[in-house]
Amino acid sequence: MNDNLNVSLTVESSCTITAGALAFGPYVATADSQGSADLSVNCTPGTQYHVSLAATTDGTRTLTSGTNTLSYSLYSDAGFSSLFSEDPNGTKVEAAAAAETITVYGRVPAAQSAVVGNYTDTVTVTLTY
């Protein structure tokens, strides 16, 4: 007598994200300071995901050193024409491979009154899938 053994497996969506560091280097008030950092997204192939940054009111962010500040913005392109998405419900991307890199570009505008110091900020990166 024979019978069949039914075998099944479900592959569920799963993702992780790792954010690099964005370091602008020394600030010179006569020129924009630019830099970039990579976000490494690792999802199960076929998973729809979206990466967003903590929202701001106008896309301008603030680096601080004590009570001193410098403004900057984060972009999704090297030409600094598109602010990086702050909308966690925006267009999703389907993972084609197990690991993908998303580059975040930053720019600190020139002509800001800068006091000597080390300026920092922390931006929350959110991965939804």
Image: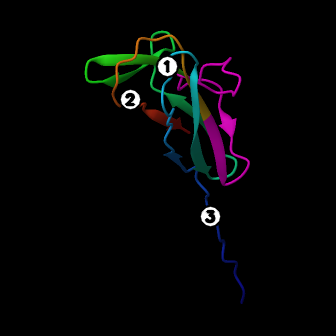
Q: Which residues are the magenta region? A: 74-103
From the image, tell me which residue sits under label 2.
121
Residue 92 included in the magenta stretch of the image: yes
Amino acid beneath label 2: Asp
Select label 3 or label 2 by which is in front. 2
Tell me the number on the disc at residue 72: 1
User: Element under label 1?
Assistant: strand
Q: Where is residue 12 in the image (x, y as percent from the top left)?
A: 58, 53
Q: What residue type is labelled 3?
A: Leu
Q: What residue type is labelled 1?
A: Tyr
Q: Residue at x 43, y 30 (%)?
A: 123
Q: Please name the residue that numbered disc 3 is placed on.
A: 9
Q: Nearer the viewer, mark 1 or mark 3?
A: 1
Using the image, determine if residue 71 lies above or below residue 15.
Answer: above
Chief secondary structure of the magenta portion: loop
Residue contact between numbered discs 2 and 1, judged by CB atoms under 8 Å: yes
